[in-house]
Each structure stands twice: as structure tokens, then as C-alpha cells.
Image (cartoon, rainbow, N blue to C red):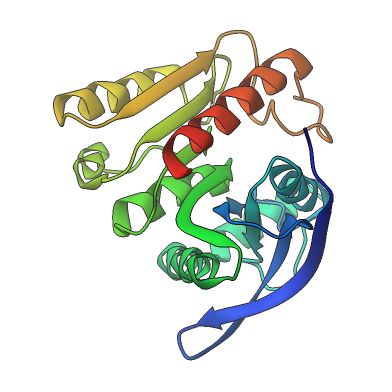
Amino acid sequence: MPVRVRARKVAYPHNGSKTPGYLAQPAQPGKYPGVVVIQEWWGLEPHIQDVTRRFAREGFIALAPDLYHGKIAREPSEAEKLMMALNMEQAVREIISGVNYLKRLEGCNGKVGVVGFCMGGGLALLTALRSAGVGACVDFYGAIPDPVDQVKHLECPLLGIFAGKDTWVTPKAVRQMQRRLKAFGKQAQVRIYRNVDHAFFNDTRPAYNARSARDAWRRTLAFFRQHLQ
């Protein structure tokens, strides 16, 4: 049963300073797994904040890092500029700091996963490739690593969620990554939703597909509960 949540903006430790984010957690005291929720190219806008609260209602402590540090795009051209200006390696380091912040937070059980959407999906996977501290990774239609053989560094279970009509992250590229994951013996599940487009999970955008989004959410919760409890 969903629980009551507390949500607020925070500044968490990073590289000797602080970096901004949005934190949501169950109001009831207890020990909960953690999830870092990584934004689309729009920024830390209301949809990502809502997804962060959804995780909290399902019994997770969830943190969404503000990788644009206060900037939010309204139009695709603006979002593209913000994404292109983002230092991806710096963003990964901020996400890893978020993972460590959640692990130390009172109420966390010490296990933290990462999940991201679009740009954030690629960053979630990159974070899992860079840090052994990630307990599980869910990638919603994020860019495939280049070169793809970087997936040999994956040390946690992966759930990849992709769209069959996606022209940015194509099914062909996804299947290539799937083959390399299998070749390297990685623990990975890949689901391609055949008749939906990129960003089908975002219920504030035209590509939203309610049926596929519900199924992807169910799979995501089950995956994190399996690996982070």
C-alpha cells in the first residue's frame, strides 16, 4: 500500500561543496532502499519531482539530482542546448555523490539503485559502469554506451526499458548492447515495448503511452525490490 511521503529540496555533499537535488522519502520511520532518479534533458522539472515522490510512496528514499543547477528547459531546442552543455562525466560524479549521500542518510538500508529517463537513462547506465556502489540500474531509453563494450564494467543488475519506435535509441542499437551484455555474462534484462516511442513513460508529453508506462513502472518496482531490499 502506498505510504505518506515527505519531499523537499536539498543540497547534498559533492566534491567538498554542495550540489542541489530533490529528496522524497516515506514519512513513516524505518529502513528503506534508496533510488537516485536522473532527469530527462528538460531538467529537474515537475514530472521528475513527481516520479521521485512516486518512488517514496512505494517505500524508497528517492533523490533527484539537479544536474542543470536550477535551469529548466521549456522547448526542445532549449533542452538540447542544456544537454549539450552538460559535462557528462561531471554529471556522473554528482550522481555518484547522490548515491553515497543516500547510503549515509538515516532511514536508508544502505542499498541504492539508479534510474534515469532519456538523457538520464544513459547517465544511469554510465554511473553503474563507473561505480561499484550502485546496487541496481534501470535505464529508460538512454543512449547506448560508445563504445558499447564498456558494458563489461557493469557490476550490478541492469533493467533496460526501450521503445520499439524510438529513432534516437534504436532497437538495433539496443539489441547490439543486449548481445554484448550476454557475451560478458552480465545480469541484465532488456524490454523493448514494440509500438511506443521515445519518452513513452512521461505522462506530461505527447509520446506518453499509459499501458506501457504502467507495465514499465511495475517492472521497475519489482526489479528494485528484488535487488535493493
Left or right of 118? Residue 122 is left
Above or below: residue 136 compared with residue 28 = above
Residue 120 visible in the current orientation: yes
x 54%, y 65%: residue: 102
Left or right of 23? Residue 189 is left
x 15%, y 31%: residue: 184
Closer to us: 215 or 152:
215
Above or below: residue 66 compared with residue 50 = below
Residue 3: % across, % down: 80, 44
Closer to us: 227 or 1:
1
State which quarter of the image contains the N terminus: top right
Quarter of the image where one finds residue 180: top left
Closer to us: 59 or 130:
59
Residue 83: % across, % down: 59, 57
Quarter of the image where one finds residue 22: bottom right
Residue 224: % across, % down: 51, 37
Above or below: residue 182 compared with residue 19 = above
Above or below: residue 176 compared with residue 58 = above
Left or right of 55? Residue 16 is left
Residue 185: % across, % down: 17, 29
Residue 142 visible in the current orientation: no
x 56%, y 45%: residue: 116
How many circles with numbers are drawn on the protein? 0
Left or right of 39? Residue 150 is left
x 79%, y 37%: residue: 2
In the image, farthest residue toward the top:
195
In the image, farthest residue toward the bottom:
16
